[in-house]
């Protein structure tokens, strides 16, 4: 009887801990140095919000973004949960408020891509959501590039929307070596290149394509993390995903994978707190 009681106490403590953990997020700071950056600038990166709200109307998140004082705000997808219509309103209100703080660039994740299908039950609702997002001044990007201002720096911002086949459960589907060259416009030589690409499984391809920094999400930090080792399983049901969270640098190019702000389906975060990214860009000679 004592053993059963002890087990029940442990289970209760775990449930309470997880409920508490899902109300918290932290700010993770990165600094990117490049000779292509002439003036200091910053961005806030919000990935995988999934309709979560930290405080009333996401006031806690908005306060933290305001504190970062970003020149631009970047969102590499999954602001909502495709099958849960109640997440649309939270995502919309958050985007409307973010657009009042700085220019917002929002690329598609797999949840937004899924809703492009007219056969999806929430497709009409998504179209209304998208129209209101654009009305708020948010720049919505699919697979495209545009020249923007990052503070006083002209940069090329690209977004990559992968077909849903590349989100197959249980495995990472190989990406053709020339996929990015075929789908994205030509890079501007000498210009700092930022890529928004929701799925981090193709980090090597993003680096080889030539992005100076790529922002990804999708893996939610791996749901469960083992301190010192990393994630155990991704939301895509791949074991020990290589690109789960953090900054992966190769030859001066970075792929930064966010642990995300929200969850869906499996609402757990074990040693894996949600995060808002604060990224500072600096001239290379200012280290």
Image (cartoon, helix red, strand yellow):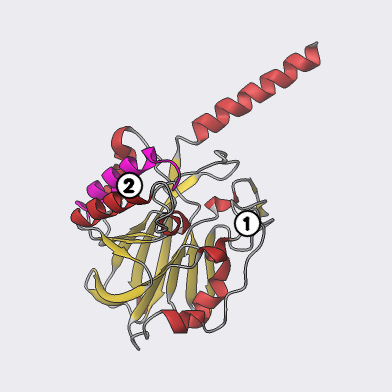
Please provide percent x and percent y for residue 76: 41, 60
Foreground disc of the pair 2, 1: 2
Residue at image location 56% in from the left, 70% down from the top: 202
Query: Mark 2–mark 1 contact, CB under 8 Å?
Result: no
Q: Position of residue 17 (x, y in %)?
A: 56, 29
Task: Return the residue found at the far bottom.
Answer: 189
Per the rendered image, the range of residues in magenta is 82-101
Label 2 neighbourhood size at 10 Å, few (<14), some (14-19), many (20+)?
few
Would residue 65 be counted in the magenta stretch?
A: no
* Residue that label 1 marks: 169
Identify which residue is drawn at 54% across, 57% down: 245
Q: Does residue 186 lie above or below 123 as drawn? A: below
Sequence-wise first label, 2 or 1: 2
In the picture shown, does residue 4 fall above or below 49?
A: above
Measuring from the top left, give residue 235's x and y in whole percent: 59, 51
Looking at this view, is 14 or 163 the one in front? 163
Count of numbered tags: 2
Q: Is residue 95 magenta?
A: yes
Where's residue 135, x and y in %? 19, 55
The quarter holding residue 280 reads: bottom left
Q: Most extreme residue toward the top, as rendered?
A: 1
Query: Is residue 157 visible in this depiction of the protein?
Result: no
Q: Residues within 10 Å of mark 1 (few under 14, many from 20)?
A: few
Q: Say which of 63 and 218 sits in front.
A: 218
Magenta highlight: main SS: helix
Question: In the displayed structure, does residue 105 sit left or right of residue 251?
Answer: left
Q: Label 2 to label 1, Cα distance in Å?
A: 26 Å
- Left or right: where does residue 72 sit relative to residue 235? left
Q: Is residue 270 left or right of residue 77?
A: right
Q: Which residue is mark 2?
A: 125
């Amino acid at each position: 009887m004592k053993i059963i009681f002890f087990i029940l106490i442990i289970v209760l403590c775990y449930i309470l801990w997880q409920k508490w953990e899902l109300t918290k997020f932290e700010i993770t700071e990165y600094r990117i140095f490049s000779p292509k950056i002439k003036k200091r600038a910053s961005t806030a990166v919000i990935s995988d919000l999934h309709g979560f709200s930290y405080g009333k109307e996401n006031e806690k998140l908005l306060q933290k973004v305001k504190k970062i004082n970003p020149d631009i705000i970047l969102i590499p997808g999954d602001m909502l949960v495709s099958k849960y219509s109640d997440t649309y309103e939270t995502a919309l209100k958050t985007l409307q408020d973010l657009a009042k703080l700085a220019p917002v660039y929002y690329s598609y994740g797999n949840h937004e891509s899924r809703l492009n299908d007219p056969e999806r039950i929430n497709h009409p609702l998504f179209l209304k959501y998208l129209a209101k997002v654009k009305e708020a001044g948010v720049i919505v990007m699919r697979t495209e590039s545009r020249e923007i201002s990052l503070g006083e720096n002209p940069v090329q911002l690209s977004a990559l929307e992968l077909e849903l086949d590349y989100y197959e459960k249980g495995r990472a589907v190989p990406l053709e070596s020339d996929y990015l060259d075929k789908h994205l416009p030509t890079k501007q030589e000498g210009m700092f290149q930022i890529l928004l690409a929701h799925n981090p499984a193709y980090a090597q391809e993003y680096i080889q394509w030539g992005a100076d920094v790529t922002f990804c999400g999708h893996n939610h930090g791996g749901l469960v993390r083992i301190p010192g080792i990393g994630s155990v399983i991704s939301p895509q049901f791949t074991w020990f995903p290589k690109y789960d969270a953090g900054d992966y640098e190769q030859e001066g190019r970075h792929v930064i994978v966010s642990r995300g702000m929200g969850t869906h389906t499996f609402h757990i975060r074990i040693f894996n707190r949600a995060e808002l990214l604060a990224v500072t860009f600096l001239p290379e000679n200012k280290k």
